[in-house]
Image (spheres, helix red, strand yellow):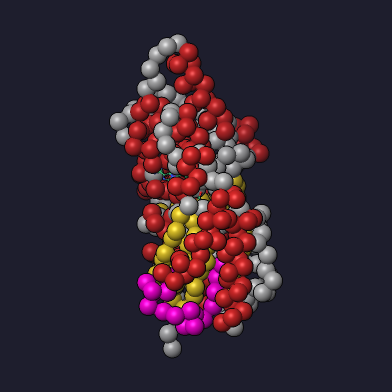
Amino acid sequence: MPEPLILGVESSCDETGVAFVRGNTLLADVVASSVDQHARFGGVVPEVASRAHLEALLPTIKRSCEEAGHRLSDVDAIAVTSGPGLAGALMVGVAAAKALAWALDKPLYGVNHLAAHVCADVLDHGPLPEPTAALLVSGGHTNLLMVRDIASDVEELGGTIDDAAGEAFDKVARVLELPYPGGPHIEAAAASGDPAAIRFPRGLTSRKDLERHRFDYSFSGLKTAVVRWVQERQNAGETVPVADVAASFNEAVADVLTRKAIDACQEYGVSDLQIGGGVTANSRLRAMAQERCDAAGISLRVPRVRLCTDNGAMVAALGSQMVQRGLAPSSLDLPADSSMPVSQTKAS
Ligand code: KG4
Ligand code: ZN
């Protein structure tokens, strides 16, 4: 008997993703992104994203079936992102997944997008050690999680109290007149800069802040510090050393992200750290995480970049874990829940 075949549908932000997973094996992963449509606004426009999902969903399902060499009728269960995310965007994927589950008479699993990000790693490195600490960094999220069972027991240790890490990259890029999305452009500019040129602030790391926000992040003060620093140079008629600003900013973000993640591993006595989300594409973040994990005796798991950004594969992977554990499916009237808490891995 082959393991069950799971179809995964993702539509929480600006990527429409449809994928097939069997067990822990990825068979097809097709993503249509509306990122280009948001570029001139400097951030994701929810209405534009919802419309793009509507247009992309059916062609993406079709391409994914072709890539997997499967028909929809081969599917044993369907998994869809129930939340968190943009309400209108989520609704498109949820409605489509319900229609498929109804028409095919297959169980439907509404899964948590954040837990799904962590679960993507299973497709590259096999089952997650439990417990695993997870650091999730993207344009929409910055979360530190304790994963005791990826399908049913995920605790949020901390999160950002203002901007997400990727959002900070995007906003700082705008100040430096670099294109959207800013992360890759900041990284490219940073390559020729000095990360120690400017000592930008590390948010929520003072002793007083740590009392209340041990595992929380804040990037808004850092962003403001960069803006001020740049404006002062401009007002003085000096040229802005873009490479040094980019490198110093990148260093500050990577430093605080990895420092708190390692602290969480040590405080909870966990020896595995998993990192995901679009910002994980950042080579300085990866290198620093590896160095610090090595020094602390923690083993680091980072999936390939394509699995770090939003996709249907991670959703199918989490649905597959739920099926493998024999969890009950969600009901067919499951909601698109824009603020679904991470502790709720599955919609009821
Ligand atoms: O996971 P993702 O594709 O979408 C969201 O769920 O948000 O993450 C997108 C974010 C953007 O803010 C982008 O600037 C950032 O990831 N990003 C990077 C890099 N590549 C993408 N940030 C830093 N360095 C990069 N190389
Ligand atoms: Zn995401």
In this picture, residue 153 sits left or right of residue 123:
right
Residue 107 visible to the viewer? no
Residue 220 visible to the viewer? yes
In this picture, residue 310 sits left or right of residue 152:
left
In magenta, the rendered stretch is: 64-81
Residue 164 sits above or below residue 244 on the image: below
Residue 227 sits above or below residue 139 on the image: above
Locate the C terminus by quadrant.
Answer: bottom right
The number of numbered badges drawn on the structure is 0
In front of the other: 203 or 263: 203
- The single residue placed furthest to the bottom in the displayed view is 1
- Please check the rendered image and state whether residue 10 is part of the magenta-colored stretch, yes or no: no
In front of the other: 122 or 317: 317
Question: What residue appears at the point 52 percent right and 21 percent down from the top-left corner?
Answer: 228
What is the x, y in percent for residue 18?
Answer: 47, 66
Residue 312 sits above or below residue 85 on the image: below
Question: What residue appears at the point 55 percent right and 52 percent down from the top-left corner?
Answer: 49
Question: What residue appears at the point 38 percent right and 64 percent down from the top-left corner?
Answer: 124
Q: Quadrant of residue 340?
A: bottom right
What is the x, y in percent for residue 141?
Answer: 55, 48
In this picture, residue 243 sits left or right of residue 141:
left
